[in-house]
Amino acid sequence: MTNKEKQTEEIIAEAAREVFVEKGMAGARMQEIADKAGINKSLLHYYFRSKDKLFDFVFSKIMGKIGGMLQGIMQEGVSIEDKIGKFVDTYTDLLSKNPFLPNFIFGEITRNPDGLIKRFASADIKPNQLLDPLQRQLNKEGYTIHPHDFILNLLSMVIFPVVARPIVERIFFEGDHKAYKEYLLSRKLSIVDFVMKALQGYK
């Protein structure tokens, strides 16, 4: 692939990401993605023959980035508290920029779980590279919680406010999006504080 083709592919991927964020997988249209990318629909189909293939490409890029960042955090030689802080900060920011991901994953869990597993596999997500160093760190610092529970509890606290944004924003912040975003930033610190206090029960 030439440099020009790679640049065009990246432009398409970014345009598609924006449309998927706004409309979701079901609501996104190839023509809209082509228009946002500034190309014609025929060229879009030259690079990606279907919306599913385009979504797979975007999904793999984002999940690969998330997986790589989280694996890197868990492999750092810092305390559990610092890892939690970096985990929450990184994941909250990525989900805020890609809010379609949690909703898409939840929808695919019931609609097409096999397809979801294939998408994770194509994104080269390696759970052991995340869980094994976490297990060693927990053991070293004297915590008995299983890393599966640790990760799932942490993910739940980070993901829910993003998934439930339409409700949280309207009920708690009267539809004020700026106030909701400020809340997400302050919540990063409260999650770390909450988790560290909860972990004391596993000493």
Image (cartoon, rainbow, N blue to C red):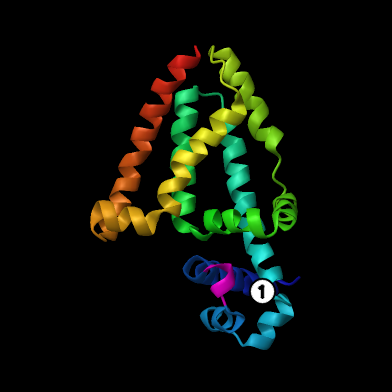
Seen at 48% across and 43% down, the residue is 90
Which residue occupies the extreme front position in the image? 110
Seen at 72% across and 51% down, the residue is 117
Residue 11 shows up from this direction: no
In the rendered image, residue 145, in percent from the top left (x then y), is placed at 56, 20
Q: Main secondary structure of the magenta part?
A: helix
Q: Quadrant of residue 178?
A: bottom left
Residue 166 shows up from this direction: yes
| Residue beneath disc 1 | 51
Asked whether 59 or 44 is in front, the reply is 59
Identified by mark 1, the residue type is Lys
Question: Mark 1 Cα within 10 Å, few/some/many (few <14, many 20+)?
Answer: some
Q: Quadrant of the N terminus?
A: bottom right
Residue 56 within the magenta-colored segment of the rendering? no
Asked whether 4 or 155 is in front, the reply is 155
- Rendered position, 190 above or below 119: above
Q: Is residue 43 left or right of residue 1?
A: left
Seen at 44% across and 47% down, the residue is 160
In the rendered image, residue 132, in percent from the top left (x then y), is placed at 67, 27
Seen at 71% across and 40% down, the residue is 126
Please count the marks in the image. 1
In the rendered image, residue 99, in percent from the top left (x then y), is placed at 48, 58
Residue 27 within the magenta-colored segment of the rendering? yes
Q: For the magenta stretch, what is the residue range?
A: 24-28
